[in-house]
Image (cartoon, grey):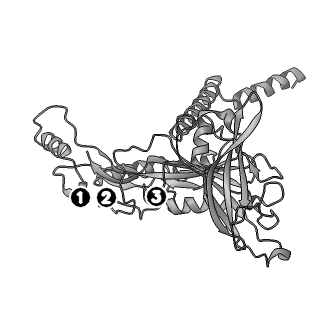
Amino acid sequence: MTLLAFALAAVACVAAARPPLGLLENHFTAETESEEVRSAAIKRLLEVFGMEDPPAVHGHKQAPQYMLDLYNTVADVDGVTKDPYLLEGNTVRSFFDKLHSEQVEFRFNLSSVARSEKVLTAELHLFKLRPQSTLTFNRHHFCQVSIYQLLDTSRNNKTQGRKLLSSRLIPVHSTGWEVFTITQAVRSWMVDEDSNLGLHVVVRTLGGSAMDMKMIRFASGRTHHQSKQPMLVLFTDDGRRATTLESLDPNDTAATDTSSLPQTPMSGPSSRTARSLDYAEEETASLPCQRQPLYVDFEEIGWSGWIVSPRGYNAYHCKGSCPFPLGQNMRPTNHATVQSIINALKLIKGIETPCCVPDKLFSINLLYFDDDENVVLKQYNDMVAGSCGCH
């Protein structure tokens, strides 16, 4: 065989092994369409969670213990709200002090809070340290701690005043978190961002004289661990609390509940064949209307880097038939009952059987880091199918 013949034969072999151009084009088109669908789905899911883009991931940050405890108070292990009235509003944010002053002054950046949100309560959390050992036997047992809002009384003259926000007695020898209400100041800052000059803490004896700050010390962002840093906790409501199907008791077990079934990932098991899946779907469709698992895995979506808790949640979905006659275990509405009768008697052409849909919805809670590394606890309505019925 000549060199030319050998080369032609090699080209022919390569051509024979290569898929037709049309198949390659179809493959790339399918991949592109799949990526577009995923991108559109993620974007729509972000809209459900009130975001345009996922927050940036800032490495392994630790959420404040207060926010973790608050999350565990309002949500169960799957993030489902225990009681919709436990939380004031639907959003709680924690902010660390940005001033890091050596004085007892603090300033918090609230630019991440939308102007449309209603400020309900704002709290200043300060960690009181133990008095220095040399001052343990000081004669003072209580002190007056006052929180002032710093004011620019005359911007032209650059003079600064202050306004009392909160004041109370605390034991001199105690240690731990002290909480002061500063709602009035935060509301004014939301109206005029430039008026946010910070907060000032003043400690006095019961007689009104200034107290030695070596005796009363609060942890600061400059010299103490993040777990003890000054923190502003803000409770707000974005106006999305209203819902039509919210239940007061997420633990209420419905007749259609099948929560004992194993949880399945959102993408579905890949090991099953198409034939077995079709058979399973036909078998499920023949069953009466009931709740089926639908697990949403945040790691699978690519959100585990900024969501603290939960790692995912069971949204559930409703599936099954609504055959005539509809029993009370199907939780039918009166309209569904009438529709079922009309369908069974074939009185009107084109009237289908009622549909199996959620008739009770629960909210879930997300604890996550925003773009400014603030930790946010937010409640989202109508995220979990609590029970199913024929409607």
* Residue 224 to residue 323: above or below: below
The C terminus lies in which quarter of the figure? Answer: top left
Seen as rendered, the residue at the extreme right is: 3
Residue behind mark 2:
256
Residue 295 seen by the camera: no
The N terminus lies in which quarter of the figure? Answer: top right
Residue behind mark 3:
86
Amino acid bearing label 2: Thr
Q: Residues within 10 Å of mark 1 (few under 14, many from 20)?
A: some
Percent across and percent down for residue 68 are 61, 60
- In this rendering, the label closer to the viewer, 3 or 1: 3
Q: In the image, what residue occupies the spot 78% across and 25% down? A: 11
Seen as rendered, the residue at the extreme bottom is: 137
Counting labels gives 3
Q: Are marks 3 and 2 in contact (CB under 8 Å)?
A: no
* Residue 188 to residue 311: above or below: above
**C-alpha gap between disc 2 and disc 1:** 7 Å
Q: Which mark is residue 312?
A: none
Q: Using the image as rendered, state which of residue 46 and residue 347 is in the foreground.
A: 46
Amino acid bearing label 3: Leu
